[in-house]
Image (cartoon, grey):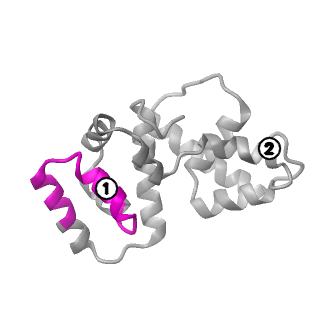
Amino acid sequence: MAQLDRVSPEIVARVSVVITEKLNLLGELRTEAHGGPRSVAEILNRMDSALSDEILEAIRDEQPLVDAIRHFMFTFEDLLLIDAVAMKELVSKVDRKLLTVALKGTSEQLKNHFLQCMSQRGGEMLREDMDAAGPVRIKDVEAAQQQILAVGSTTGEPGGH
């Protein structure tokens, strides 16, 4: 963000809201020493995907910087990359209602990745919940996914680079 010539006040306000919400979830301020692209990626990971795409598009002239930020970004689909042990720990810490919403509209492969980390009955119940939930707004799905990624970041799981 420091290398941008112009940043919309609306973007700054939205980033501020997201950071405030994250700090409230953490309950305390933690400081970590790492570079700019990593920090920006963490902010973008917690934002609405359309807004983060818009921000990256706005700085497309700085392609090396965009590439560096994207390197640190972690998406919900990237959960396919973590092993079964880490997935089991993540699933154990996530509310089933939140998971039900987050998995709506995802690939069958990702759904199965989550379901394999659950008991057979737990997986069946989750599938039933997803079927019973009906259509869900994409905004709600993305919010649920971001909350799950945030759980992963506070427990040391991937998703919090």
Say what amino acid the circle numbered 2 marks.
Pro
From this viewpoint, is residue 93 visible?
Answer: yes
The Cα–Cα distance between marks 2 and 1, rounded to whole angstroms, is 35 Å
Who is closer to the viewer here, 34 or 84?
84
Q: Position of residue 75 (x, y in %)?
A: 51, 51
Rendered view: 66 above or below 57: above
Name the residue tied to disc 1.
99
The label shown at residue 65 is none
The label shown at residue 64 is 2
* Classed neighbour count for the residue bearing mark 1: other residues with Cα under 10 Å, few (<14), some (14–19), many (≥20): many
- On screen, residue 52 versus residue 45, left or right, reads right
For the C terminus, the quadrant is top right
* Classed neighbour count for the residue bearing mark 2: other residues with Cα under 10 Å, few (<14), some (14–19), many (≥20): few
Q: Which residues are magenta?
A: 103-127
Give me the residue at 65% from left, 49% from top: 15
Q: Specify the farthest residue to the left.
A: 121
Element class at badge 1:
helix
Say what amino acid the circle numbered 1 marks.
Leu
Q: Position of residue 119 (x, y in %)?
A: 13, 48
From this viewpoint, is residue 10 visible?
Answer: no
Rendered view: 30 above or below 19: above
